[in-house]
Image (cartoon, helix red, strand yellow):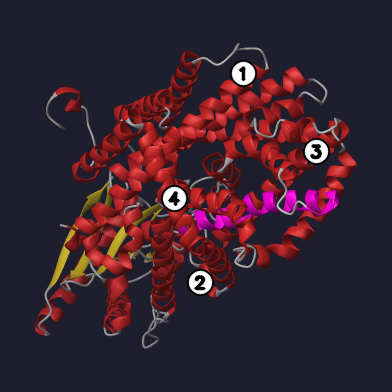
């Protein structure tokens, strides 16, 4: 318990992360609020200079992220699971995908589905090209900006954090991605600095996004007649109501509130997309979708490395669109990547990469085709009504829906979808902020979510009122350049960790001994056809494991090796462990615990297996310090258990003798303090 005031409540916030972050955030926010024009001018100058000189870094790094993940997925490293080898995914496949959409770019699809294709069409990249070519280029550039590269950026961060968090059992926070470089120093000043930067970037990015999202909701409500004119009080009401709903969702837990909101909103979004498809030019849209995919795949390599080095007149378009998008996705990578990591426990790397890259990309291509090509077709039927209003991007979606049947209903559905995407983005953002601020924790006191939600609301309102929101957005985009280089470093260290992991776990056990010599087969048969009870496990620990460990301890001592025996109960289940300390490397541990699992009722009631008279089966299982889950020891006698412990100890000695395994065997817990 913390002392004093509201901090009497339980907290897991880390002062060395939170206090410096709040000082930085307050300083920047006050600068943008007090002198918004000056801050905007300085930051815009810096942004332009960075974009003009280093735009190639954005392009090259994002192309590298995409190729890195593809190669990783195709190789044998893709079989590695983000967690224990036999761990099941934490969320269902559908829930997982829904949460990917809610955190990634949900509100952006609603905003830019019509706006970006129409913007490209109204100001074409190649103004001298034919209308057909301009239309195809408008859709190609839209699909490129919202396609697989954006998700590759998120995927690099998400995979790195999920791997080191769930495989190496490190905190699921940004600092853990640098573990191969920093090792135990991730718990000291270098790791703290990384988390401070990540926390500031996340709050800056969320504040600007929520501010502009509120403006879009405000515009939508004006279009349907719910509001008249521009009113700052209405903006305040929208922000407070939306973030209040996000806080309520957040304190219900990410496994409940966010999952239900995400699933419901994805269904609503798909329903709206199908309505546009079926009531709009259906055949044209489906034909365009087919051609868009081919055009996108045909040009994806060229687009991935396009910098307009030979067309200087296109540089302004290039920096205003592609570079701005890449910088914006990178600036959101700490937030979205950490959230994706948190919800991806139990997935294999191959499953993670395929789903994070392909499934959202295919959905985005379909969405942008339905709304983008539908809007382009509608623009041609209305003598350019949409292109004439291209500058009013927040209205374009509603202007388009007004040309289709039931515009009042579809506009209200669109507003609802935008509002829920707004809420889920804020909800997942609060979750990520809490996680970074608490050094990777997954559960938080409710008052912390209320605190962060209130801070986001106050920042967004203050910056909207002063006009400093755009300056803060510019600074967020500037931060993307150094962070893109950090992400490249993270990718290489992720690869190093995967190589060590594969070498370590693929090494075969010694075959110098065998488990069973065939003796005492009658007792073995009796155990096969009966369920184990908790008392049986206790008897195994007392009569088999403890004597075997004591005998080994004595023999280790004769060879100058100090071994300890530890026993007890955890959550009502007994355990016994043999430990050989190894200094800075991970200790050798051979533990025997208790595993409980259910037995099929059909088996229990079968006449063929009369001894199985209970639906709960308890059995002794082994486990190890490196995180591997062991196997059943139910049938072993003392001599066989002795043999098995020595097999594992021999394997351990051979592993630590190889220096390339030091990264995995390094004792993180001993160095944390």
Q: Nearer the viewer, mark 3 or mark 4?
A: 4
Looking at the image, tell me whether mark 2 or mark 1 is earlier in sequence order: 2
Q: Residue 376, percent across and down?
A: 80, 39
Answer whether residue 131 is magenta in the image: yes
Residue at the spot of label 1: 221
In this picture, residue 660 sits left or right of residue 260: left
Q: Residues within 10 Å of mark 2 (few under 14, many from 20)?
A: some
Q: Residues within 10 Å of mark 4 (few under 14, many from 20)?
A: some
Residue in view at x 57 percent, y 24 percent: 217
Cα distance in 3D space between marks 1 and 4? 33 Å
Asked if residue 214 is positioned above or below residue 52 in the image, the reply reads above
Cα distance in 3D space between marks 3 and 4? 35 Å
Residue at the spot of label 3: 374
Label number found at residue 77? 2
User: Magenta part of the protein: which range?
Assistant: 128-156
Residue at the spot of label 4: 47
């Amino acid at each position: 318990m913390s002392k004093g005031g509201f901090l009497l409540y339980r907290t897991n916030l880390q002062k060395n992360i939170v206090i410096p972050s709040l000082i930085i955030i307050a300083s920047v926010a006050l600068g943008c609020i007090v002198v918004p024009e000056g801050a905007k001018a300085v930051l815009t100058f810096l942004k332009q200079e960075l974009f003009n000189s280093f735009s190639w870094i954005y392009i090259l790094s994002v192309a590298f992220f995409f190729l890195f993940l593809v190669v990783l997925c195709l190789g044998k490293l893709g079989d590695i699971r983000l967690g224990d080898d036999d761990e099941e995914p934490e969320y269902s496949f559908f829930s997982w995908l829904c949460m990917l959409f809610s955190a990634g770019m949900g509100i952006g699809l609603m905003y830019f589905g019509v706006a970006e294709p129409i913007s490209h069409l109204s100001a074409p990249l190649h103004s001298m090209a034919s209308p057909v070519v301009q239309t195809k280029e408008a859709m190609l550039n839209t699909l490129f900006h919202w396609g697989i590269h954006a998700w590759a950026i998120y995927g690099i961060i998400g995979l790195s954090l999920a791997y080191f968090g769930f495989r190496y059992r490190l905190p699921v926070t940004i600092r853990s991605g640098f573990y191969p470089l920093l090792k135990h120093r991730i718990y000291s000043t270098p790791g703290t600095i990384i988390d401070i930067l990540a926390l500031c970037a996340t709050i800056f990015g969320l504040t600007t996004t929520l501010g502009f999202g509120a403006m879009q909701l405000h515009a939508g409500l004006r279009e349907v007649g719910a509001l008249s004119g521009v009113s700052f009080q209405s903006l305040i009401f929208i922000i407070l109501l939306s973030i209040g709903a996000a806080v309520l969702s957040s304190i219900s837990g990410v496994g409940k509130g966010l999952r239900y909101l995400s699933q419901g909103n994805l269904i609503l979004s798909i329903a709206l997309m199908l309505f546009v498809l079926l009531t709009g030019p259906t055949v044209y849209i489906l034909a365009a979708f087919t051609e868009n995919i081919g055009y996108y795949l045909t040009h994806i390599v060229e687009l991935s490395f396009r910098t307009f080095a030979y067309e200087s007149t296109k540089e302004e378009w290039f920096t205003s669109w592609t570079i701005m998008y890449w910088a914006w996705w990178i600036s959101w990578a700490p937030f979205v990547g950490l959230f994706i990591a948190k919800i991806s426990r139990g997935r294999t790397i191959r499953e993670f990469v395929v789903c994070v890259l392909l499934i959202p990309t295919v959905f985005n291509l379909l969405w942008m085709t339905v709304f983008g090509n539908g809007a382009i077709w509608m623009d041609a039927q209305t003598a350019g009504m949409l292109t004439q209003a291209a500058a009013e991007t927040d209205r374009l979606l509603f202007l388009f829906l007004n040309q289709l049947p039931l515009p009042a209903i579809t506009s209200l559905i669109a507003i609802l979808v935008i509002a829920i995407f707004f809420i889920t983005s804020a909800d997942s953002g609060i979750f990520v902020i809490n996680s970074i601020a608490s050094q990777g924790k997954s559960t938080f006191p409710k008052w912390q979510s209320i605190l962060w939600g209130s801070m986001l609301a106050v920042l967004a309102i203050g910056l909207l009122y002063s006009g400093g929101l755009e300056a803060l957005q510019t600074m967020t985009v500037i931060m993307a350049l150094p962070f893109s280089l950090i992400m490249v470093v993270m990718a290489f260290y992720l690869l190093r960790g995967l190589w060590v992991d594969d070498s370590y776990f693929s090494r075969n056990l010694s075959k110098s001994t065998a488990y069973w010599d065939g003796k005492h087969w009658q007792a073995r048969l009796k155990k096969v056809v009966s369920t184990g009870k908790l008392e049986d496990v206790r008897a195994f620990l007392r009569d088999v494991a403890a004597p075997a460990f004591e005998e080994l301890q004595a023999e280790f001592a004769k060879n100058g090796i100090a071994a300890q025996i530890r026993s007890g109960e955890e959550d009502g289940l007994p355990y016994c462990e043999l430990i050989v300390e190894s200094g800075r490397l991970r200790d050798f541990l051979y533990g025997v615990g208790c595993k409980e699992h259910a037995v099929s009722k059909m088996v229990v009631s079968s006449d063929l297996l009369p001894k199985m008279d209970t639906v709960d089966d308890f059995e002794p299982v082994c486990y190890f310090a490196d995180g591997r889950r062991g196997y059943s020891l139910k049938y072993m006698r003392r001599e066989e258990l002795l043999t098995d412990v020595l097999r594992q100890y021999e394997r351990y000695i051979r592993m630590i003798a190889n220096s390339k395994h030091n990264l995995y065997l390094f004792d993180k817990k001993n160095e944390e303090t």
